[in-house]
Amino acid sequence: MRKQLQTFCLLMIAAMICSPVMFGQAPQKLNPWASYIDVGARRSQLKHTRNARIRLALSQLQRCETLPVVAPPEGPMRIPMHYLHGGHGPINPAEHIKTAVYGRFEQRVTAGMNQYLATGSHEEAECAQDQVDRWAQANTLLDYDAVRDAQSWYQVEWTLSSIAISESVLLNDSKLDSAVTSRDVDWMNRVAHRMIGFPSEGSHLNNHHYWRGLAAIATGVISTDPQLFDFGVNAYKTAVNDIDQRGAFPKEMARHEMSVHYQSFALQPLIPIAAFAERQGVSLYNYKSPAGRSIADAVNFLGVALSDPSIMKAYTHEAQNVDSNAPDFFASLEFYRRQFPHRKLPSSIMDGLEKPTFATRLGGSTTVIAGR
């Protein structure tokens, strides 16, 4: 009997070790209503919160219904590169002109989603869904070439992240027209597969790969597409496997005066990827690389680099251009602190989280969505 029990225990352990969920692959069936946060639970928390920072963020929310409708841009996407030369230095002003329409689109969609999350307003959810549907029916975000127009490719990953994340919350509104949501989710699925389907994707494994991972996993959840879900999980693992002995992302450390900025920018999609995975029963936050490193090491490095810039001399001698006052700089850390409320964070990060954070690419008001 004792030997049988030992055999049974060994089989159970083997099953756990070999489980797809343990390895971070998509569960057998994805839950399209499981956003990166629990919508009902979060609404209840927001309704009763006494947290001054969260209440301030709630008071700052815009309304979709009061923002102008954003018509989809016509013709092929032709967005000039963000930097005038290479991956740092002077910014190309022409890029902002071309991307403004995408910013307005993300702003209007996330405004409606945030209002729906906070108040349950069907009118705001419907407004956001209608805005998405206008772009879906125009087949936007599909006409571009990743090699010839790389910045257009980057814009797709950011805008798709924004709206797929928003859709993962909006789908919880049972009053929305299912024909419309199905049409819009199908469009996002096509956008996601085109985005990850370029041959050059495999050679662009820096922060853009992580952003495509976030867009893919969010779309994979709402469209119950395991291929997209696994793409996001594997992008996360690629990033963690790349973390060096100090906790830095080496490819982001090659950005000269923007290295600390890009350490933060790389974390922005990675932490929400883990949040999506966890909500599907896939343990990803605690994933460790073969060298034993985890996302915690990258978070801690960011905090150390902010408080002690001398650590950056190991990578570059250029003074760092760190805009830590930007509303999106600490945005992803809202999700990290929510997941690990008792884990000690560097004081520089805690200081950064004293004011509301916001990033349309992550769903809008990240303090309203996940703040503590």
Image (tube, rainbow, N blue to C red):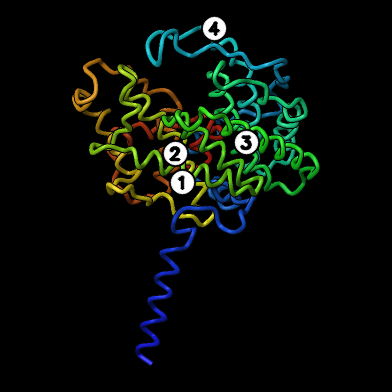
**Can residue 161 be seen by looking at this rendering?**
no
Q: Amino acid at mark 4?
A: Ala
Q: Position of residue 343 (x, y in %)?
A: 31, 49
Quadrant of the rendered image containing residue 138: top right
- Hey, which residue is sitting farthest front in the picture? 199
10 Å crowding of disc 4: few (<14), some (14-19), many (20+):
some
Q: Nearer the viewer, residue 261 or 247?
A: 247
Compute the Cα span from label 2 to label 1.
7 Å
10 Å crowding of disc 1: few (<14), some (14-19), many (20+):
many
- Mark 3 against mark 1, which lies toward the viewer? 3
Q: Where does label 3 land, which residue?
A: 193
Relative to 155, is 237 on the left or the right? Answer: left
Q: Amino acid at mark 3?
A: His
Query: Of marks 2 and 3, which one's residue comes earlier in the chain?
Result: 3
Compute the Cα span from label 4 to label 2.
29 Å
10 Å crowding of disc 3: few (<14), some (14-19), many (20+):
some
Compute the Cα span from label 2 to label 3.
19 Å
Compute the Cα span from label 1 to label 4.
34 Å
Q: Amino acid at mark 1?
A: Ala
Q: Where does label 2 land, which residue?
A: 270
Compute the Cα span from label 4 to label 3.
28 Å
Q: Amino acid at mark 2?
A: Leu
